[in-house]
Structure formats: C-alpha cells, structure tokens
Image (tube, rainbow, N blue to C red):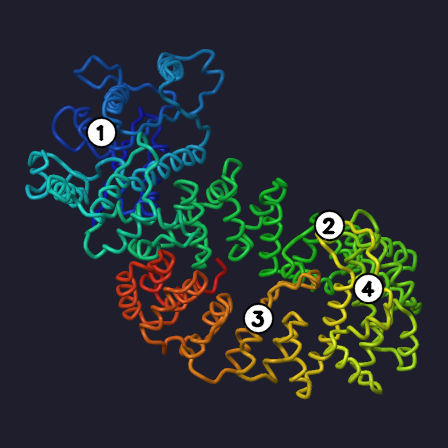
C-alpha cells in the first residue's frame, strides 16, 4: 500500500511551550482522523526532535526543516536569540522562516502559515526590543502582501487555526497528490529509462505511472499508435497529476467507462482510482459512469472518504458524495477534526452552492439526526427560494423520527404553503396529541391543510363557537370550508346540500393552482363538495334520495347512491347506462345540450367540449360505483368498458381485476394511466402502475420469461421487473437477462438494477463481460448498476436500490 508522508515543521521562539505542545498533538490528531483515511501519514517536526544530533543546533533543525511540506510559524512576545555562527539572522526563528520562505518561493513547498498571539495594547504602545521586532515582522508580512497571517487570543482559537490549516492542506495534498511524499529510492526499471538518475526520488505509485507513460511513448512511434484504452489512461494520469495551476482535471464519461472495462488490464495507482471515483460521483445522478468499484477500492474507509469529499472538491463531486452517502444510508461521523461546524459550513454554508445545499437537505431529510436539526433550521430561517421547502421538510422528517408530537408543534410555527403531500399527512396525523391552545394557533396558518385539520380537531372537541365556524366558511381553501361545514354539523345544525354547494363552490380569495375557476365557481371547491355530498348521501333514507332525482344539481349523485345501495332497479339501470356511454341518460336530461360557459384557467383556455366532459364524468363516477362493489357478475361489463375505452383504467380497476381477473386481463391492467387529468385533484401520489404490475404478477401463472414475451408497454415491463420476486427473476437465463439489458431505456435500467440486487456476484461478472461484447446495444447506464452488484456487499446493494435516487 502506498503511504504518502507529509512532514509538518513547527517553528517559534521561546515562551510558547503550551502552543507548541498543542500543535504537536493536533498534528497527531489530524493524522489519525484524516490522513490515515487518505493513504497518508502526517508527522510533526521541530527543535524538540532535532537536538539529539552533533553539530550546530540550528543546522540540525534546518536539516529537518528542509524536507518539510508544511510550515507552521508561531509568534508571541519574543523574537528569539541569535542562532550561532551565522550572523545573517537575528534569531533561530528568523533563520527557519527565511530559509523556508525562500524554498517555498522557488519550489512551491512548504505551504506556510503564520500565527501571531495577540499582544496587549499597553505593550504595543510601549514595546520592548523583542516585542518591537515582533511587530516589525508582522508589519513586514502585511506590507509585503505576499503572505497572510492570522492572530489568536487563546489556546482554543490557536487550535482552531491549526486544525483548519492542517485539515485543508492535508486533504488538498492527498486529494490531488500535489507533491511527492516520502522520499523513496527510484528503481532502475521504472525510472532511469525516463531520464531519472538512481539518486532521484519519486512519489509512491509514480513508478507505475512512469512505466505506463514509457510504454505509451513507444506506442506513439508505431504505425497504429496507442489504442483507445491507453489513450484514456493517458488522460487519467494527467488528471490525477493535475495541480492548482492546471485547468480543472476531469475524466469524461467515455474514458471513465473505457477504463472501467479495462480495469483488470491496468494497475491503477491510488491517485488514479481516486480520480475515477470523483468522475463517478460527479455523474451519479445521470447513472452513466461507473462508481461503486472505485468506492470499494478505497477499502474500509468508504464512509470517511465520502464524508470528506462532501466538503472538499468540485461542486459536482460534492453533490455526488452526499447523494452516495444518502443512497448507502451512511451516517455523518462527528469527531474532533470533522465537527458539526465543518459539516454545516461545507453543506449549508453561506457560500455553498445551491446544488450542494439541495443534496444535503435531501440527505438530512432521510438520514439526519436530532443533532443536525439546528443546522437545518438555520437554513430554513434564511428563507432561500432554492432550499426553503426542502429545509422545512428535512426538519419535519427529523422530528418525525425522534418526536412526532414535536413535529406537529413545529409545523404550527413554521409558515409554508406547499409541502410534500405524504409528509404533510404524517405530521397532521399527530394533531390529535396537541393541546387545544396549540391547535388554536393553527387556525391562522398559511397552509390551508393545517387550517383544515386544526379546525376539524377543535370542532371535534367542541372548542369552537359557531362564529369561528361561520368565518371559516369564507376561507380561500376549500378543505377549510369543508371542515367548517362538518363542524357546524357536529354542533347540531345540518346544512342542506344547496347551502353546502354555495359555501364550497363560491370562489373565496384569490384562486390558485392549475385549474382555477369554471363558469365563476371554484373548481377545487366543486370537487370538495362532491366528496362531501357523497358522504352525506350514504346516510340518507331511500325516499330522500329519490326526492333528489328531481333536483338537477344533485340528481346524478343521488342516482349513483341509489345504485350503490342496490335500491330497487337503480343498480341494473346504472349498468345499462354505462354500456350506453350515458348517451340516453344525457339526451333525457339535457335535451338541448350544454352551452359553453365563460372559462378561465390554464386547462380551460384550451379546447373544451362541455357535453363530452359531462359524459366522461358520468361514466367515470358510475364505473367507480361498480368497481367498488367488487361483484364478479360485473366482470364482463368491466372488461367491455375498458375495451371500448369508455373508462380510463385507474386504481379502482386495478383493485377489481387483481381480485376477480385472470391472465386475459393482463393487457387491460397494463394500460393503466398513472394520472387522470379529469380527477387530478384526487391524485395522492399513489403508484397505480406499481399496483397494476403487482396485480399482473398475482393473476399470471406462467414463468416470468413468458410474461416478458407478451407485448406490453415499456413502462409496465419496467414495473414488472421492479416488482417480480428476486427468486423468479434470477431464474431467467443469462441470454434472457441480456436481452432485457438491450431493451428500451426504462426496461434496461430496471433489469440492470434487478440484476445487481438479486443475482450472485460471479454471475453478474459473466453477464457484464458478455454485455460488453454486444457493442451495437451497449449502454453505460447498465454498467453503472451492474458495477454496484459487483462492488458492494448484498445488504448494502439492497439498501442503495431501496432508496429513491
């Protein structure tokens, strides 16, 4: 294993023993916490470790100093004593400083920092000779403008400065392999042929790079030149060796995949593997660059390396490192060197890029702990448009994992308008545990959902007077108006349906959303009224329902309610109307048709036929009645409705056919739509395609390869692969799997992920090797996921696959 040694020289005059001791201890701490994970070794040097030799003391110190990579100068109120025979310097510290500065200017090494201990003002106004020399030295640094120094007033401030300098420089040097570390004699076979003498020194790993470059140089002279893989590695060597003076060093998508394909051919150095890891992280969200094998190559320190890369590196790499930590569910590790402050500064600092902050908040929402809640809240307090909703969601998610009641209290004092619907429902479900006074604050919340649930809970407790409920009926949010209506009902006054319609359909406040108003009514309010009315109709007597058949506004709903309760012949009449597409029913009740009304809103600025829309609504609602009853006698009717495209298959159809259908219904289930435009406000984010795929797998009794041979939509084929049990998928032959890996985009991605999660590693290797030979249908995305299965242990693979990308 190549270990790079970084020497740190600590220079100071006398009187700073405590600071020197603290600095030595900090070097050793940084070595344990950072350098070791980056294949480095950090060693401190100073006069304490140089005085045992023979000769002039300062010369012995200088010998150590001349090989150091980092220089930490410390100055208090003493300048020091002359170093001996050399009268060019007035103190040993000055000699150490000047010689190191000269070498740094000429070679770029060592990297230097100067730390001054604060001098009391009374001593500055009347300094002695030594303090005067210190002040002159500080002024010279300031006026020269070629070196920035820092001041400290306490040991803790001093340690912070030392820690910041060391950690940044160590990560920079080991991250980019900036300078040669430990001096190692060059071997004749690896270096003399490229112009080095046997006395030269090289970086660990440089011998392999040098030998490769020598081989490529010979290929350049041949007729055909180097092949594509060698050219790719040539660029990789350059990228891995790049320093701050070069342009940004990157490995492109094609080269990264080519090098991964030839990973058994080349003996990559650690710096090269580190560069390939960076390329994979930078492209993690596009899933087209191998990543996982390079992450595995760093050994047991995967979590530590990823955590370091979330703070240091280019923006895309930092984002990728955070995403990888989230996918692998790796917790943040807090220690003396990598504390909460460093994480917050790197992830959510004021200068941190928006993409990094977004990735960090998504990580914290899924994995963050209570200890990280304060940093999330500080981000939320900034009210940044790029991160505010995510910060609120992260805070609520953390609280739900640790204290559900506190999450409910937090949402009451957090202003927002929209949040993730599923998360919001989970928090609002905790309102039962809040006190009445706490819930009263929710009545004035910016979110209509919060207002509605707070109103509902307070009404259940009898904690609201009628005046509050009446005022809530004027709320701009329809859900709040529904809660107000139900509250009035609980108080013993039942509004008639016409009054309820007036309350819910009338626009209150500025309408929002995609659908705004139709003919001067609140579209969302109308849909809310329909749900409210349906619940009322379920409790009505049959005669009362029949009476509503003469009321145009409620006729259709009353008709469905009578059919749903199988009263008299209404059930069979409804089914006849369905087969007829409600043509006869429409002609009877709208003999002159429906005249268009003034429309507003995005959707209704498009072509809109009110007669077709009404028939679609009638069919949709009647079909829901039939499907909900789950009567096997309706199976033929349901199939005919789907085949004639009178209904748009959705969750209710999937539920019905999953119980009563057979393999002949596979094509019907496969035609489900994940989104019903006519009922968009009822969409709760349920994955109807996933439900349909599970239903197909339940009713199909053949083998999975036979199911895949059926002509199905691409999206459904992908869902079937996602949902099929691993044991059934693993029974596919290699050729059958390879055929899936060469299919359409969604299918090949699903198949590649499935292979990674349920196929043995040796078999994945064979499949990958065979897949690479099929150059006509070779996709990098497949390699990304196969690489996951090859690189990580099965439990971690399953963790990655189970986490939303």
Q: Nearer the viewer, residue 238 or 164?
A: 238
Q: Judging from the image, what secondary structure is the residue with disc 3 in?
A: loop
Q: CA distance from mark 3 to mark 4?
A: 30 Å
State the separation of the CA atoms marked 3 and 1: 75 Å
Q: Nearer the viewer, mark 2 or mark 4?
A: 2
How far apart marks 2 and 4 lie (CA) works out to 24 Å
Say whether marks 2 and 4 touch (CB < 8 Å). Answer: no
Side (left or right) of 599 relative to 119:
right
| Lower position in the chain sequence, tag 2 or tag 4 | 4
Name, please, the residue furthest toward the front: 592
Give the residue at mark 1. Answer: 65
Marked residue nearer the N-terminal end (1 or 4)? 1
Q: Earlier in the sequence, mark 2 or mark 3?
A: 2
Dot placed on the residue nearer the N-terminal end, 3 or 1: 1
Nearest-to-viewer mark from 3 and 1: 3
Give the residue at mark 2: 605
Question: Which is more toward the observer, 461 or 536?
Answer: 536
The image shows residue 740 at horizontal and vertical percentages of 38, 68
Secondary structure under badge 2? helix
The percent position of residue 243, horizontal first and vertical second, equals 29, 34
Does residue 583 sit above or below 452 in this rendering?
below
Alpha carbons under labels 1 and 4: distance apart = 82 Å
**Residue 312 appears at what percent x and percent y?**
40, 41
Residue drawn at point x = 27 percent, y = 52 percent:
258
Q: Which residue is mark 3?
A: 671
In the picture, the disc for residue 529 is 4
> Within 10 angstroms of label 3, few (less than 14), some, or many (20 or more) residues?
some
In this rendering, the answer to whether 574 lies above or below 266 is below
């Amino acid at each position: 294993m190549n270990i790079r040694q970084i020497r740190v020289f600590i220079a100071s005059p006398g009187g700073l023993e405590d600071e020197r001791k603290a600095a030595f201890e900090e070097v050793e701490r940084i070595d344990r916490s950072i350098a070791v994970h980056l294949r480095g070794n950090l060693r401190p040097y100073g006069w304490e470790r140089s005085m045992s030799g023979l000769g002039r003391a300062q010369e012995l110190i200088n010998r150590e100093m001349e090989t150091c990579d980092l220089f930490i100068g410390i100055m208090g109120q003493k300048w020091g004593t002359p170093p001996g025979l050399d009268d060019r310097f007035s103190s040993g510290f000055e000699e150490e400083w000047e010689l190191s500065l000269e070498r740094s200017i000429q070679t770029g090494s060592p990297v230097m920092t100067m730390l001054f201990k604060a001098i009391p003002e009374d001593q500055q106004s009347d300094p002695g000779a030594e303090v005067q020399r210190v002040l002159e030295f500080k002024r010279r640094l300031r006026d020269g403008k070629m070196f920035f120094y820092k001041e400290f007033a306490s040991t803790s401030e001093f340690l912070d400065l030392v820690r910041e300098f060391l950690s940044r420089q160590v990560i920079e040097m080991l991250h980019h392999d900036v300078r040669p570390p430990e001096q190692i004699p060059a071997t004749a076979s690896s270096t003399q042929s490229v112009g080095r003498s046997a006395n030269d020194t090289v970086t660990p790993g440089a011998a392999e790079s040098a030998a490769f470059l020598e081989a490529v140089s010979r290929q350049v002279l041949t007729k055909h030149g180097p092949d594509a893989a060698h050219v790719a590695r040539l660029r990789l060597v350059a990228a891995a060796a790049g320093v701050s003076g070069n342009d940004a060093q990157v490995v492109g998508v094609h080269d990264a995949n080519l090098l991964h394909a030839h990973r058994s051919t080349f003996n990559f150095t650690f710096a090269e593997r580190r560069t390939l890891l960076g390329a994979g992280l930078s492209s993690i969200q596009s899933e087209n660059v191998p990543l996982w094998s390079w992450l595995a190559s760093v050994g047991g320190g995967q979590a530590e390396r990823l955590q370091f890369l979330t703070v240091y590196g280019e923006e895309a790499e930092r984002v990728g490192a955070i995403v990888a930590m989230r996918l692998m569910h790796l917790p943040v590790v807090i220690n003396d060197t990598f504390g909460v402050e460093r994480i917050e500064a790197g992830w959510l600092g004021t200068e941190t890029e928006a993409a990094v902050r977004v990735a960090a908040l998504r990580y914290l929402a899924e994995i963050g702990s209570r200890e990280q809640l304060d940093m999330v809240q500080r981000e939320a307090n900034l009210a940044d448009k790029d991160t505010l909703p995510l910060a609120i969601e992260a805070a609520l998610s953390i609280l739900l994992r640790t204290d559900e009641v506190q999450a409910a209290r937090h949402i009451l004092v957090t202003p927002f308008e929209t949040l993730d619907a599923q998360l919001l429902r989970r928090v609002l479900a905790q309102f039962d545990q809040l006190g009445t006074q706490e819930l009263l604050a929710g009545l004035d919340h910016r979110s209509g959902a919060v207002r509605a649930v707070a109103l509902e809970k307070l009404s259940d407790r009898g904690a609201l007077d009628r005046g509050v409920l009446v005022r809530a009926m004027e709320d701009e949010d329809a859900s709040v108006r529904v809660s107000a209506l139900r509250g009035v009902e609980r108080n013993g006054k039942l509004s008639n349906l016409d009054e309820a319609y007036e309350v819910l359909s009338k626009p209150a406040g500025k309408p929002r959303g995609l659908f705004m108003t139709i003919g001067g009514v609140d579209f969302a309010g109308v849909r809310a009224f329909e749900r409210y009315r349906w619940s009322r109709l379920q409790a009505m007597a049959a005669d009362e329902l029949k009476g509503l058949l003469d009321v145009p506004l409620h006729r259709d709903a009353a008709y469905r309610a009578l059919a749903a309760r199988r009263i008299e012949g209404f059930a069979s009449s409804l089914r006849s109307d369905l087969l007829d597409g409600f043509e006869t029913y429409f002609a009877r009740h709208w003999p002159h048709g429906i005249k268009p009304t003034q429309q507003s809103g995005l959707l209704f600025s498009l072509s809109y036929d009110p007669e077709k829309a009404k028939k679609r609504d009638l069919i949709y609602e009647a079909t829901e009645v039939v499907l909900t009853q789950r009567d096997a006698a309706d199976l033929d009717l349901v199939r005919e409705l789907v085949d004639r495209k009178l209904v748009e298959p959705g969750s209710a159809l999937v539920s019905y056919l999953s119980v009563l259908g057979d393999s002949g219904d596979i094509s019907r289930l496969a035609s489900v739509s994940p989104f019903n435009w006519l009922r968009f406000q009822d969409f709760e984010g349920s994955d109807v395609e996933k439900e349909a795929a599970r239903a197909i797998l339940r009713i199909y009794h053949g083998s999975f390869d036979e199911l895949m041979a059926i002509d199905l939509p691409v999206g459904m084929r992908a869902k079937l692969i996602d949902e099929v049990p691993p044991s059934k998928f693993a029974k596919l032959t290699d050729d059958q799997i390879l055929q899936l890996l060469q299919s359409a985009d969604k299918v090949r991605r699903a198949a590649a992920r499935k292979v990674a999660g349920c196929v043995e590693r040796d078999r994945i290797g064979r499949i990958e090797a065979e897949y690479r030979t099929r150059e006509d249908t070779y996709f990098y995305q497949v390699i990304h996921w196969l690489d996951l299965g090859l690189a990580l242990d099965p439990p971690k693979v399953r963790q990655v696959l189970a986490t939303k990308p």
